[in-house]
Amino acid sequence: MRLLLATLVPVGVAFISVGVLANYVAVARFNAFFQSDIQQRDARLVGAFSHEYLFEHSWANAPDAVQRFALLTGERLVLVDAKGTVLADSGSATDIGRRAAANWHRPEPIWVGSQQVGTLYVNPTLPSRTESQQEGRVLANVNRSLLLGLLVAAAVSLLVSFVAARTIGRQMASLIDVARQIGKGDLSPRARTVSGELGELAVAINGMAADLQRSLRLRQQMVADVAHELRNPLQNINGYLEALKDGVAAADEHTLNILRSESNVLRQLVDDLQDLSLAESGAMAIELEPVRVEEQVRAVVSSMQPRADERRVALSNDLPLELAPVQADARRLRQVISNLVSNALKYTQPGGRVWLTAAVENGQLELTVADNGSGIGQRDQELIFERFYRVDPARARATGGAGLGLTIAKELVQAMHGSIGVRSQPVHGSEFWVRLPLAQPAAVPAPVAPHA
Ligand SMILES: Nc1ncnc2c1ncn2[C@@H]1O[C@H](COP(=O)(O)OP(=O)(O)O)[C@@H](O)[C@H]1O
Ligand SMILES: [Mg+2]
């Protein structure tokens, strides 16, 4: 309803102003037209009368001429001589011989040479020249057609805006309906897409519903995955505890070690989940400052060395001695490097090798963790950064990962405004790269100009 009013009010205002303007213009134009028409006719009449006088050298023929011309023009003509006495009147005979009344309109002096021989009055008692009957009739006609046009136009615009308001109103109602259903949690309805702005709104609403549906599915999947990951170690712990209780297993070092490693798996999983949820919600405290990558790599390599030795994999730090510092969070960067190195050690056979290199290019530092291990197939390369994704779930479980390491690494690198990716060929090995922006060199204070 408000929509209808909003359309109608400006249309109405426009039409009324056009009507008023057109009327005003028409009146002015007709006035000008009749004015000049009357002036020309009066001049012709005066010319004819002066010709009459010139012919007779007197007004002897005046009554006759007045009657004739009055018949021609259809107006009342009164002829007055030079002294102001009425000689002839086509309207009535009562004024003949009297003086012309002072309030008569439209006096037209009649000249012969330089001498005024009389005065002609045209319709002397009508109120004003412009309001002659004819003129009034024409103007009334104009006004009537204007009013008619106005009414027709108003009716048409009313109809058009009513139809438009109804279609827009209906489309809006369907959009509101869909939005309400989505708000209530039913993500399946979709708005009908029409053309125009409302169509764009419908597309936006549909896109939003699809996004919500996707993230809802991801959340459900995540809960299922977490439950699945928790079940295994819990079942193992439970089994050993039952065996201990029944006296089937002894509480020796072997059993306790197994129990501890299973509970470590649980702890690692919980830690990973917490990191992931913090990083994904943007709530993880990341403190960016200039960081020396080579120092972080050195720390990770030396802490991983025992594990590499245990797996009989050669772990080497091939970084240049000195590199430009990057803008990063040192602790989180170490976490990323640890994840990559631990993966490389995990997926490389004994006798293989893992090495780290780095180079600066285009204002960025690229760190790579390479191995000559199992490698990753093309299809899997796109998926390994997704949560809980493992190329070979059975084997990966034996090595203890839940498929969250790379997801967390990616979130952390992105939080440090960097990027991460992989180049790999099955059998030949993999090469994970991390690119981070270089730290801005500390601004050198400009020399202070001495004051004059
Ligand atoms: N260096 C690597 N060589 C071969 N495959 C790898 C390597 N790093 C990661 N992957 C594959 O990517 C998957 C996901 O890695 P990640 O997220 O760290 O999970 P997790 O290590 O818990 O299995 C691994 O399961 C593995 O299949
Ligand atoms: Mg891992």
Image: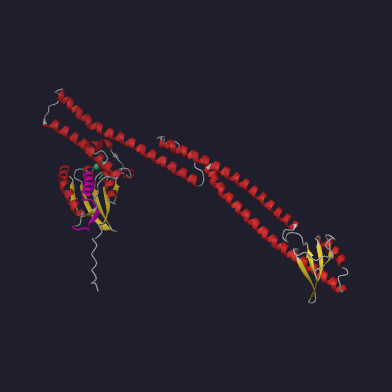
Indicate the colouring scheme. Answer: secondary structure
Decide which of 281, 421 is in the foreground and name it: 281
Residue 30 lies left or right of residue 331; in this view the side is right
Which residue is pictured at 73% across the width and 59% down the height?
Answer: 127
- Tell me: residue 24, above or below residue 257: below
Q: Position of residue 16 (x, y in %)?
A: 61, 52
Q: Where is residue 402 in the image (x, y as percent from the top left)?
A: 26, 38
Q: Is residue 324 magenta?
A: yes
Count the marks: how many?
A: 0
- Which quarter of the picture shows residue 366? bottom left
**What range of the chain is rendered magenta?**
321-342
- Which quarter of the picture shows residue 28? bottom right
Of the 4 image quadrants, the one containing the C terminus is bottom left
Q: Is residue 298 magenta?
A: no
Which residue is pictured at 85% across the width and 63% down the height?
Answer: 67
Q: From this viewpoint, is residue 10 visible?
A: yes
Q: Where is residue 326 in the image (x, y as percent from the top left)?
A: 24, 55
Decide which of 250, 210 is in the foreground and name it: 210
